Amino acid sequence: MIRVETLSKRYGEAPPVVDDLSMEVAAGEICAVVGTSGSGKTTLLRMINRLVEPSAGRVLIAGEDTRNLRGHELRRRIGYVIQGHGLFPHWSVADNIGTVPRLLRWKRAAIDARVDELLALFGMEPATYRDRRPAELSGGQQQRVGVARALAARPDVLLMDEPFGALDPVIRGRAQDELAAVQARLGTTVVLVTHDMEEAVRLGHRIAVMDAGRLLQCATPAEMMARPATPFVEALVGGAERPFRLLSLDRVEAAVEPGEADGPPIDAGANLREALSACLWSGRDALPVERNGQRIGRVTLAALRRRAAPEAGTPAP
């Protein structure tokens, strides 16, 4: 667990970049931090691993005050991923991933095994990719290697600063799905800074909204969209788009009903927003639903509209 207690950062007489912020991130949780540029998101992230020293307050990780650790020792225990991956261009993929384990003086065999384990976890065949240089990889592959490097020493905490911002939308969606799957498997606590509310809703177990250095609300996506704490939060979570974002929080299997439907099926693991889009684009009133290649029922446009309408108080699409 990460606990931030009345954390502040000031530069001279200017208003604080982070202003008396307190929050908790539960162990094994993804907390997405959102807000406009200059709201203090990245500074908060950098204070957690003491790349920026706070002016006041403290950070506790698993109950331990980070001020009691040397900075470099703390940072070796925390994975850190930035936009653009930050790989060492003249090192191989294996050498990049093994950076922190080498600093921690792991044995070579343990490093090699960990590199191969992480490459396989991210869908990159170790024999094919471990000896390549970053320039020989696609943007999405480079970002995967950047995340693998951050996870190599099995950190309890992973900090991510706009990790997918440079990727095109298709690759970005895949990278988000991969992160969610890997995080669920490893149980790593993640603090993710993003400008993209869609990304926050897709990945965050909770979302923290910042503005002018202050924390306005920290809540689950569903709670935040149903009960935004301030007009700024309400605007950020989408206003008229809130019904669609609410649909993205539930899977199709939650709305399956008995019956048949014509046309291409949708997977039970897709979200309800994707099902609504498929209905509207195809002009169908219902979609067949499959799980592992087996038909399990259907999802109807009427049911999707009912789910979209209530919380935001706006007409259904």
Image (cartoon, rainbow, N blue to C red):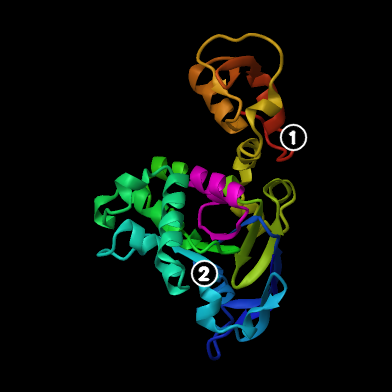
Tell me residue 258's x, y (percent).
71, 13
Q: Over which residues does the magenta segment extend?
A: 175-200
Image-based side of 12 in relation to 187, left or right: left
Look at label 2 and name its amino acid.
Thr
Q: Which residue is mark 1?
A: 310
| Quarter of the figure with residue 61 | bottom right
Mark 1 surroundings: few (<14), some (14-19) or many (≥20) residues within 10 A? few
Give the dominant element type of the magenta stretch: helix, strand or loop: helix
Q: Specify whether residue 316 is in view.
A: yes
Per the model, the C-alpha gap separating discs 1 and 2 is 35 Å
Q: Given contact means CB atoms under 8 Å apart, are the residues at marks 1 and 2 in contact?
A: no
Secondary element at image label 2? helix
Secondary element at image label 1? loop
- Residue drawn at point x = 50 percent, y = 80 percent: 72
Viewer-proximal residue, 155 or 116? 116
Q: Which residue is mark 2?
A: 42
From this view, report whether residue 89 is shown above or below residue 262.
Answer: below
Tell me residue 270's x, y (percent).
57, 30
Mark 2 surroundings: few (<14), some (14-19) or many (≥20) residues within 10 A? many
